[in-house]
Amino acid sequence: MEPTDTDRVFQSYGRCCKNELFFIDFYDRFMGSSPEIRAVFVDTDMKQQRHLLRNGIMQLILHARGMPDTKLRALGQSHSRSGYNIRPDMYGLWLDALLATVHRHDPEYSDELAAAWRCVLQPGIELIRGAY
Ligand code: HEM
């Protein structure tokens, strides 16, 4: 059977996670994408944050595979205006930074794989973003 988009993204993420530089590169890129984004993380312990994101991205992928929403709903609350106050327009930069980092770290990267990533993560991102 042909692998589905979620299978391909799951495998790609596995290749990326093998190298811990993946998360360092992601945050360097994401924080470099706007002074506003950098400002959001001034008081953040980035070592801990990279670790938390590893799990967060896995939650987005598992959501596409039909896992219950509970963890993503909690992220929606923590990122909302009553939490970290992450404006909905910031998620585009987040996803662009992620795809650029996948490009750099996954030797099997292709445009089709990038499209699969966007498609697979979108519903989970919308769930978090929509809780604003
Ligand atoms: C914290 C995931 C998008 C800013 C976290 C945590 C996770 C996470 C797992 C730690 C758990 C928590 O505190 O609730 C994600 C995912 C995203 C996303 C999966 C994409 C859909 C963003 C965006 C920003 C952002 C766009 C904007 C700059 C933050 C901040 C924290 C955080 C400020 C808390 C840092 C601290 O504790 O100092 N995120 N996040 N996140 N995230 Fe996100």
Image (cartoon, grey):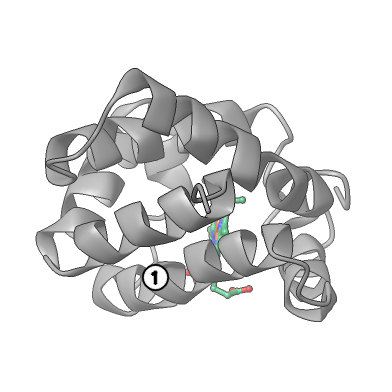
User: What percent of the width, then of the height, locates residue 116?
Assistant: 52, 35
User: What percent of the width, then of the height, locates residue 59?
Assistant: 60, 70
User: What percent of the width, then of the height, locates residue 34?
Assistant: 39, 25
Answer above or below: position of 112 versus 15.
above
Q: Residue at x 82, y 52 (%)?
A: 127
Answer above or below: position of 47 versus 23.
below
Image quadrant of ligand 1? bottom right
Ligand 1 within 8 Å of the CB at mark 1: no
* Camera-nearest residue between 3 and 77: 3
* Camera-nearest residue between 114 and 96: 114
* Camera-nearest residue between 35 and 7: 7
Q: Amino acid type of disc 1?
A: Arg
In the rendered image, which quarter is residue 67 located in?
bottom right
Q: Residue at x 25, y 39 (%)?
A: 101
User: What percent of the width, then of the height, locates residue 75?
Assistant: 71, 68
User: In the shown orientation, is residue 14 left or right of residue 77?
Assistant: left
* Camera-nearest residue between 64 and 80: 64
Residue most toward the right?
A: 131
Q: Residue at x 35, y 26 (%)?
A: 33
Answer above or below: position of 73 versus 23.
below
User: In the shown orientation, is residue 28 left or right of residue 61?
Assistant: left
- Local SS, label 1: helix
User: In the shown orientation, is residue 122 left or right of residue 111?
Assistant: right
Q: Which residue is mark 1?
A: 54
Residue most toward the front?
A: 1
How many C-alpha atoms fall within 10 Å of the one at disc 1: few (<14), some, or many (≥20)?
Answer: some
User: In the shown orientation, is residue 70 left or right of residue 31?
Assistant: right
Q: How many marks?
A: 1
Q: Residue at x 78, y 68 (%)?
A: 66
